[in-house]
Amino acid sequence: MSYTHFEPAVATPESPVAIKILVAGGFGAGKTTLVGTVSEIRPLRTEEALTSAGVGVDDTFGVAGKETTTVAMDFGRITFRNNVALYLFGTPGQQRFWFMWDELAKGAVGAVVVADTRRLADSFAAIDYFEQRGTPFVVAVNCFDAAPRYDVHRVRAALDVDPSVPIILCDVRRRESAKLVLVSIVEHALRLAGRRAPVR
């Protein structure tokens, strides 16, 4: 699929560039945390408490301490100093809410797939989704405390992603680490479009 539909203008004080980025991944991988960590505005969250109704429906293996879940989307914004604004849309991770992904994906320049090494298989659905749509994406491996640590080569092999797809080891609780992930997806998307990334 061609990426020529993406034609960002040059950012100026009078004409800021707005870029839509999706943040996807498995249940409990850290999507909401990433959006909240970097957002310069109070992030919009649509989280609800996990209840007994989800028992047998939601797989909480490896994330037993999680008490809430995103049921619609997360939303945040970060503006870089050269007047480029990223609008972040976090997708729900549970399969029963995947019907919302098509709507959220409209107009997105690229996506971040947040991965948890305790539940790497949960990343497959998001990776397949963006590969099928031809949407540029990066994989952000969220390095949870006490989670197994693997190097980028082993993660790439386990997820079977193309060598051109950037994989970043990160801690989405840390602002600079999360910002690096966002810079990576913008650079990757613009590289595929044959343009220079404006967010350094």
Image (cartoon, rainbow, N blue to C red):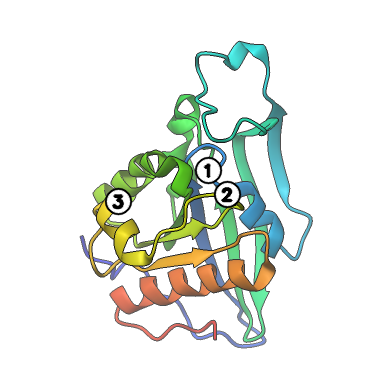
Q: Nearer the viewer, mark 2 or mark 3?
A: 3
Which residue type carries mark 2?
Lys
Q: Quadrant of residue 51?
A: top right
Crowding near pointer 2: few (<14 within 10 Å), some, many (20+)? many
How far separated are the C-alphas under marks 3 and 1?
Answer: 20 Å
* Residue 84 picture location, percent across and down: 59, 77
Which residue type carries mark 1?
Thr
Q: How many marks?
A: 3
| Residue at horizontal 53 percent and vertical 43 percent from the top | 91
Q: Is residue 82 above or below residue 67?
A: below
- SS at mark 1 in the image: loop
Task: Return the residue at label 1.
Answer: 91
How far separated are the C-alphas under marks 2 and 3?
Answer: 18 Å
- SS at mark 3 in the image: helix
Q: Quadrant of residue 163?
A: bottom left
Task: Return the residue at label 2.
Answer: 31
| Residue at horizontal 29 percent and vertical 51 percent from the top | 159
Question: Is residue 112 left or right of 76 when viewed as pictured?
Answer: left
- SS at mark 2 in the image: helix
- Using the rendered image of the protein, determine whether residue 150 is visible from the camera's viewpoint: yes
* Residue 12 picture location, percent across and down: 60, 88
Closest to the observer, 170 or 184: 170
Task: Return the residue at label 3.
Answer: 159
| Residue at horizontal 49 percent and vertical 45 percent from the top | 104
* Labels 2 and 1 touching (C-beta < 8 A): yes
* Residue 96 picture location, percent across and down: 47, 24
Which residue type carries mark 3?
Leu
How far separated are the C-alphas under marks 2 and 1?
Answer: 8 Å
**Disc 3 or 1, which lies upstream in sequence?**
1
**Disc 2 or 1, which lies upstream in sequence?**
2
Crowding near pointer 3: few (<14 within 10 Å), some, many (20+)? some
